[in-house]
């Protein structure tokens, strides 16, 4: 059974991705745009009190991570 998706604030999601090597490129309205050296993908993280579980799952997939890897970094 895969690990359950936590309910996280946008800033917490940014902090976790930062610990995994992603960098904040800019803030675009209510979203924080993150980039990583060698990655084509950019992550657009909503700066909300709660990031929707489907959105978080999609961001983790786009970053090329498993849920377990993401949770281990949190």
Image (cartoon, grey):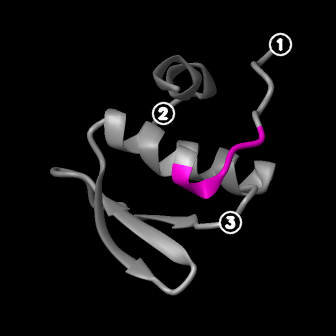
Distance, label 1 to label 2, CA atoms, is 17 Å
Q: Relative to 68, does residue 51 appear above or below in the rendering? A: below
Which of the two discs, 2 and 3, labels the residue nearer the N terminus?
3
* 24 relative to 55 in the view: left or right: left
Q: Is residue 34 above or below residue 30?
A: above
SS for callout 1: loop
Farthest residue in the bottom direction? 29
Find numbered disc 2 in the image and state the secondary structure of the residue it sits on.
loop
Indicate the quadrant where residue 68 lies.
top right
Does residue 43 appear to the left or right of 24 in the view shown?
right
Q: Which numbered dot is residue 65?
A: 2
Say which residue appears at 45% left-offset and 69% top-offset. 32
Q: Please say whether residue 63 is visible from this viewpoint.
A: no
| Residue extent of the magenta highlight | 7-11
Question: How far is the residue under mark 2 from the one under mark 3?
Answer: 22 Å
Is 9 colored magenta in this rendering?
A: yes
Nearer the observer, disc 3 or disc 1?
3
Q: Is residue 9 visible?
A: yes
Q: Which residue is mark 3?
A: 48
Residue shown at the point (54%, 46%) measured from the top left:
13
Q: Are marks 1 and 2 in contact (CB under 8 Å)?
A: no
Near-viewer residue (62 or 22): 22
């Amino acid at each position: 059974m895969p690990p359950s998706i936590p309910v996280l604030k946008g800033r917490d999601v940014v902090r976790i991705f930062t610990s995994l090597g992603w960098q904040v490129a800019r803030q675009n309205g209510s979203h924080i745009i993150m980039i990583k050296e060698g990655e084509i993908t950019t992550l657009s993280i909503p700066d909300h009190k709660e990031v929707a579980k489907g959105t978080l799952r999609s961001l983790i997939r786009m970053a090329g991570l498993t849920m377990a890897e993401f949770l281990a970094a949190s």
